[in-house]
Amino acid sequence: MAVIFVLGRFLETISIILIATPIVLAVLMALDIDLIWYGILLMMNLKLALITPPFDMNLYVIKGNTQAHLAAIIRGVRPYVLIMLAGLAVVMMAPGIATWLPSSMAAGR
């Protein structure tokens, strides 16, 4: 997740998925890690990367729409970054939170 977070600060979301998935997928399958859990963590991490500097695409969109200074926008986003980091940490430590609904859907078949 740390490598994907760093990649997310410099690349766009689709590029990271296309670059990282083939490499990480083999490791995940060898370690028998739940792929749904990884996919949810990946999406949470990539959404976090869209609002963290230096190449934060969503912040530039906000700047273009509001004409506010980028420094003010970054200050306003800080609490959300902390909340998203906390949520990412919770889901990383308790995978059952992320996999409960998909596993209950599969059990109903």
Image: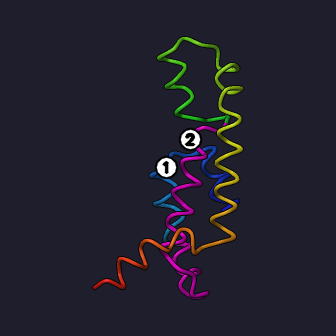
Residue drawn at point x = 49 percent, y = 76 percent = 35
Q: As drawn, is 88 to the left or to the right of 15?
A: right
Mark 1 crowdedness (10 Å alpha carbons): few <14, some 14-19, many ≥20: some
Q: Quadrant of residue 63?
A: top right
The stretch in magenta equals: 23-52
Reply yes or no: does residue 45 show up in magenta: yes
Q: Please name the colour scheme applied to the rendered image.
A: rainbow
Of circles 1 and 2, the one toward us is: 2
Q: Amino acid at mark 2?
A: Leu
Q: Quadrant of the N terminus?
A: bottom right
- Viewer-proximal residue, 93 or 100? 100
Residue 45's mark?
none
Give the residue furthest to the left.
109
- Contact, mark 1 vs mark 2 (Cβ under 8 Å): yes
- Give whichever of 5, 98 is nearer the camera: 98
- The CA distance from mark 1 to mark 2 is 8 Å
Q: Nearer the viewer, residue 1 or 80?
A: 80
In the depicted structure, whether residue 77 falls above or below residue 33: above
User: x and y percent of residue 31 in the render?
Assistant: 61, 87
Q: Residue at x 50, y 73 (%)?
A: 99
The residue to which callout 2 is attached is 50
Please name the residue shown 65% across and 20% down the image.
70
Amino acid beneath label 1: Thr
In the picture of the structure, the residue carrying the numbered disc 1 is 13
SS assignment at label 2: loop
- Residue drawn at (56%, 46%), measured in percent from left and top? 11
Vertical comparison of 89 with 48: above or below: below
